[in-house]
Every structure is written in C-alpha cells, then in structure tokens.
Amino acid sequence: MVINLITFASLLHKQVSVRSSHEIILNELEKYFTVNFIDYQDINKLSPDDFSILFIATGGVERLVIQHFEALPRPAIILADGMQNSLAAALEISSWLRSRGMKSEILHGELSEIIKRIFVLHSNFMAQRGLYGMRIGVIGTPSSWLIASNVDYLLAKRRWGVEYTDIALERVYEYYNQITDDEVGEACAGLAGKALACREASPEDMIKAMRLYRAIRKIVDEDRLSALTLSCFRLIEQTGTTGCLALSLLNDEGIIAGCEGDLQSVFTMLAAKVLTGKPAFMANPSMINARTNEIILAHCTIGIAQTEQFIIRNHFETESGIGIQGILPTGDVTIVKCGGECLDEYYLGTGTLTENTNYINMCRTQVRIKMNAPAEYFLRNPLGNHHIMLHGNYELMLDEFLQSNGCKRIE
C-alpha cells in the first residue's frame, strides 16, 4: 500500500531537519506502508488515483496550503505529530478548508491509532476511486410506482463519479429476437440441473428467460456497463418473460443488476459491492413487526451464488417467466439504502437472518430478519420501498464510507 506524503515545511527548515524532527512517526509509517515524500511544489505531479496525505511538518505553512488549494486532494487528510508547531498549523488549516466547503480530518495522537485510521481512509479512497467512471445502464424507465426513487444524473455524477446512461428497451427486443432457442438450450439444462426443484415454470419459460439474459448481456458488453437496472414489467408484453433470471445470472457474474428501474437501489448495490466485495439482495420490506423488530424481505430474484439452494419458480405478481426462490444462509446481515435525488442520504442497520419463509402471497425469495435497532424506521421514515441486504456485518465500514462522502444517516 502506497501513501504519498505531501510535505509542507517552512522555508526556514531544511529537508534533513524535517526528517529528523519527525523520525518517530515517519519510521512507524514506513513499517506498514510504502511512503513517497512529495514536496508541496510538486503536488500537481500526483494523479487523482494517488492516495495522498498532507504532512504538516512545521508551523508557518498556512499560506503555502492556501496557495495550493485547488490542487489539494479531497477530502483533505492532514497528518501532524505536534513537533515543530505542526499541530497548531494543522488546526488552522483544517478550519480554513472546512470554511471553504472541503472536508478535512487531522491525524494526530497515538501512532497505532493513526495507522489504523489510515487503513480505513485508504479503503474509503479506493472505493471512491472504484466508483469513479462506472456506468449504470437504465434499461427502459423506472417503474411508475417508484415515485420516491428518482436520481438526478448530473448531481450523482458530481458526487460519486458514476454515470447513468439510458438504454431503450427496443435494443433488448432486437437482440432477444435474434437469439434462437437452440443457442440457450444447454445453458437452461445446466441451470435446471443445479436447482433443488422446478415448480410452476415450464421448459419454454426457461428458454425465454435465458434468451433475455443473453440479450441483456450483449448490451452490457457493448455499452461497458458496470451495473444496470431493468424495467422488468414492461418486458413481459414484448417477450412473454420477466427479467428475474437475467438479473440473477448477471449478479453472479459481477454485473450489479437491479429490478424495476430503481435508480437509487442499483447505486446502493454497486457502492456496497465496490466497498465490501459482496453481492447484495434487493428486496421489498414485505412485513414489519415493530414490537419484535423483525422484518421480512422478499423479491423474485437473487444471485444464485448468494444462496445455499434455489428453486426455479415463476414470477409472483404476473405468474409468468422465471423467478428464483433462494434459500439463504442464516446469520449476520446488513441492510442499507442510499436515497435522495443526489444520493446523499442513507439508512443503515444490522440484524440476524433467522428464517427463510415461504408465504404464498409474497415474492419468491423471502427472509425473516431480527433487526438490532428499532424497525420503526420502515414505518416512520423510510427511504422508499426497496432495501439492500448483504450477508455479514458491514455497518462500520459502510457508515464510515457514506459519512466521508457527506451523506446524512436516516434513523
């Protein structure tokens, strides 16, 4: 792991004396990281992909920082050990930066805590850079009932660096009609052979769903998409199938794929994957018990790799196409949702997946979760319908990342 220390030192101090004055902290950093010392005058030689820390080596450098304001890394991570009046200068600099709308943080104190904090900040930095330039395909339009799930494409790009791109459903239909049944027969048989059971769906349903997957996969490759959200219900009229199987297979392949054209949820899934490396389950909160703090999440698709076993079903609402009933492992889970038109709000909670339920009047994959915090959020202050579930407890990691990007946590 490489860190670049952009060194600000008063002209009264020679480079040799700077090193000797801060020998303890610099030696500690070099035990864990590859440290590049960058003179502040060479700050423009660094790229946005370089993880950089402002090393305040002496007092009297406030004006030097101001002069290089536009070139400073954002957010500003300021390292000061207190020697040579460095902390005094860091405090003044941090206050000035924040008054100009730039987030800043001072690293100071116990060396072990500074090292741990740098690892966290580096993880956040890598996730932010990982999101930058990612393309989210919006295939069709958001479902009409998602009245609280809009995203301003321009503001999202400015905040997160992601690019939403609209894709007409007509391209899906064109490619779908070009794919023959014979081309997907072997893949259908292979998938059916892995299932615990096949219930309502017919072989013809499976073939149609696999053809749709191939059509969408072609668009993913052509448009270099990192993620997509699909206007599922509009597909049924033209293809006679739903997108549930396609989304399941795409998620297994690392292409983040969400339902119903939900712009906020697909971003949440993408951000969670970039940060944690984990795929996610996008679902409806279908039942909530505020007294016991239990919720049931349900949807008709999930990446098969997230399941212990799966059953091939049809789509619950339309009773057509292919749906996936996943049997998920019990244990710790994290629930997260990014909301707001510029994706600057979020809900975050943890709980325990205690049971895979099988209600006949809900979507196919169903899980009961005992929340660790009051479930009243879903009834009093929800960020829309769909929420995202990940296996494992990632509350601290996600909270740190979203807070560092200026997002407001909704309780």
Image (cartoon, rainbow, N blue to C red):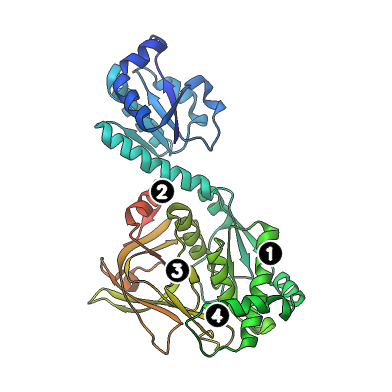
Residue 174 in the image, given as x and y percentages of width and height = 75, 73
Q: Amino acid at mark 3?
A: Gln
Q: Amino acid at mark 2?
A: Gly
Of tags 2 and 1, the one toward the viewer is 1
Can residue 296 be seen in the rendering of this structure?
yes
Instruction: State the count of labels.
Output: 4
- Tell which circle, 4 or 2, labels the residue nearer the N-terminal end: 4
- Asked if the residues shown at circle 3 and circle 4 are in contact, with their CB atoms under 8 angstroms apart, the answer is no
Q: What residue did someone put label 2 on?
A: 406
- Tell which circle, 4 or 1, labels the residue nearer the N-terminal end: 4
Can residue 386 be seen in the rendering of this structure?
no
Residue at (29% x, 25% y) in the render: 81
Between the C-alphas of marks 1 and 3, the distance is: 24 Å
Q: Residues within 10 Å of mark 3 (few under 14, many from 20)?
A: many
Q: What residue did someone put label 4 on?
A: 193
Q: 41 left or right of 404?
A: right
Element type where label 1 sits in the image: helix
Residue 224 in the image, given as x and y percentages of width and height = 65, 56
Kindly indicate the quadrant of the structure image that contains residue 217.
bottom right
Residue at (48% x, 29% y) in the render: 69
Between the C-alphas of marks 2 and 1, the distance is: 33 Å
Q: What residue did someone put label 1 on?
A: 219
Q: Is residue 305 above or below residue 76?
A: below
Element type where label 2 sits in the image: loop
